[in-house]
Image (spheres, coloured by chain):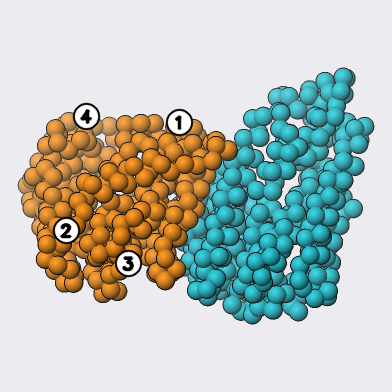
Chain colours: A cyan, B orange
Amino acid sequence: MKQLTELQLLINDAVGKLSYPAYPADLYEPISYILSIGGKRMRPALLLLACDLFGGDVNKAVEPALAIEVFHNFTLMHDDIMDKAPLRRGKATVHEKWNTNVAILSGDAMMVEANRLMMMVDDRILRAVLNVFNDTATGVCEGQQIDMSFEERNDVSIAEYLDMIRLKTAVLLGGTMKIGSIIGGASDADAELINAFGVNLGIAFQLQDDILDVYGDPEKFGKQVGGDIISNKKTYLLIKALELAKGETKTELNNWISPGQFENVEKVTAVTAIYDVLDVRQYSEQAMRSFADKAFAALEAISLPEDHKQYLRDFADSLLVREN
Amino acid sequence: MKQLTELQLLINDAVGKLSYPAYPADLYEPISYILSIGGKRMRPALLLLACDLFGGDVNKAVEPALAIEVFHNFTLMHDDIMDKAPLRRGKATVHEKWNTNVAILSGDAMMVEANRLMMMVDDRILRAVLNVFNDTATGVCEGQQIDMSFEERNDVSIAEYLDMIRLKTAVLLGGTMKIGSIIGGASDADAELINAFGVNLGIAFQLQDDILDVYGDPEKFGKQVGGDIISNKKTYLLIKALELAKGETKTELNNWISPGQFENVEKVTAVTAIYDVLDVRQYSEQAMRSFADKAFAALEAISLPEDHKQYLRDFADSLLVREN
């Protein structure tokens, strides 16, 4: 059984060997650029891991794993335009370093490249693999659109929010592991179960991210604590707080998220205090645990040797106890 | 043998029946919108025609033909953002009617949808069809990037220009007919030949478009005559004129294409006069004919009954004598 860290290195190496034509430079250089600025290569490594766990040859899964990494970076390139983000992993985003047109078109070319890489599987599983990939890609587009639409709404429900994070981030994790399992030779039932494991783990992970943005250790979290509060981001915590708040607390919370200039530290302190009063952290952790439980239940049902399941369980645990 | 007009109606009907989820509305409504504002459905109809000519069942080619139409409209949606175009076929473009983010993301979703539709072929030809489709899509992205880069250059060569229009518009015509022929059961050799027919016809057609923009009958052409001259678009005519002009004529031409405000009619008249002096129209028509000849030569070599080839010959003739 291969170790995840080993597979991350393998993929990082393979990403470094991807090469693109020199011409037209403004189409291909941004692709090499965004792929070079790193990331943990967690998704492609998990594709390889899923393949390995089901007894497949990881060497036959490298191109599909690269397809996932290229696809993921394509969505980042386009999301950064939409979010007007100046930086990605501490480096200038493509639309800043080049321009928006270049970022649109290079992203489009990456999507085609991802399809090409994803096709590098045996004929007998080609259609199955591409079906999962297309469903995943559609889900990610839907999730991004729903997330953008939330910015203009103050009546987002918990159910809508969970559906959004499922589509925007979790289906890619599930689809990635499902593709790896198909290449590894998993049965249809096991492929569905590992998909469910990935999707539910992805939702749990995103909920943890929401919690850490408010309650994380600034040293370890690696992002500005309270960033979501400052930007009025519709997270599980804010949506839950809006649902629970009554009377004066509700007025106060609505005031903090209304348009206007606030001092950042003061706002973060005040909104966090409201969250504390409403027990929002506990509700969020409860939701996170319920999705983690679903992930573990799916894992339990998979026909894999116990030590293989334990490896995935340990991985999930390590993901979900980053800071608490 | 089916008629092209009949196949255009068939495709138009099939496009009308494409339906997308209601949610998220801002992802799917723009797709239905851009597909509803028309176009002649020439590409998908040619896919069906190629299938039919090689003895295939056009009903088995409808989804791949729709894939081509969806893909083409995805490129239009993104190109319109890049060109800041307010109108497409007389209607508001998606980025104007909604916004740029919606147009980026709906376009991305269309690309996935095109892949999904293109997969609706028999297993035995799935990989071949998708390979052509991916190569075509990459070509179109490259062509668009090269075209954008020309805007900032005054030293574009004829060879570079021909390569750009081949990629930006002609490979899609070639790839479309090639996919149709594969579905129809063509041999590899014939599929390559019909691809060559489509690519060379596409280049000839684009050269004709360049000529008509200057010398077309305004009544029949349907666009503002001289639009390319007004916008200093690098067409075959302008590039050839820059190559041929000497002395005073060169100075005069460079002056007209330098930054600055000019009266449109005056500019069009003056630049056209320079083109006339340099015989640019004749050179362009010669180039157009040479690509048309290549298209006809490829057609000649295809193993198809004479009446089938004649149908394609007549079609090509009708495309290339629109206005002169």
| Residue at screen point 90% across, 53% down | A324
Q: Nearer the viewer, mark 2 or mark 1?
A: 2
Q: Quadrant of residue A254?
A: top right
Count neighbours of disc 3 (C-alpha within 10 A) and say few if under 14, some if 14 to 19, many if 20 or more: many
Which chain's residue wears label 1? B
Number of the label disc, if any, that sits on residue A206: none
Return the residue at label 4. B263
Amino acid carrying label 1: it is Lys
Q: Is residue B170 left or right of residue B76?
A: left
Q: Are marks 1 and 4 on the same chain?
A: yes
B306 shown above or below A106:
below
| Residue at screen point 79% across, 67% down | A312
| Residue at screen point 86% across, 57% down | A321
Earlier along the polypeptide chain: callout 2 or callout 1? 1
Number of the label disc, if any, that sits on residue B182: 3
Q: Position of residue B266 (x, y in %)?
A: 16, 31
Kindly state the secondary structure of the residue where label 1 is placed. Answer: helix
Kindly state the secondary structure of the residue where label 4 is placed. Answer: loop
Q: Is residue B50 visible?
A: no
B262 shown above or below B68:
above
Return the residue at label 2. B312
Return the residue at label 1. B97
Q: Is residue B183 visible?
A: yes
Earlier along the polypeptide chain: callout 2 or callout 4? 4
Q: Is residue B163 left or right of residue B141?
A: left
Residues under numbered marks 3 and 4 in contact, where contact means CB atoms less than 8 Å apart: no
Calculate the distance from the C-alpha at mark 1 to the C-alpha at mark 4.
31 Å
- The total number of labels drawn is 4
| Residue at screen point 46% across, 56% down | B115
Amino acid carrying label 4: it is Glu
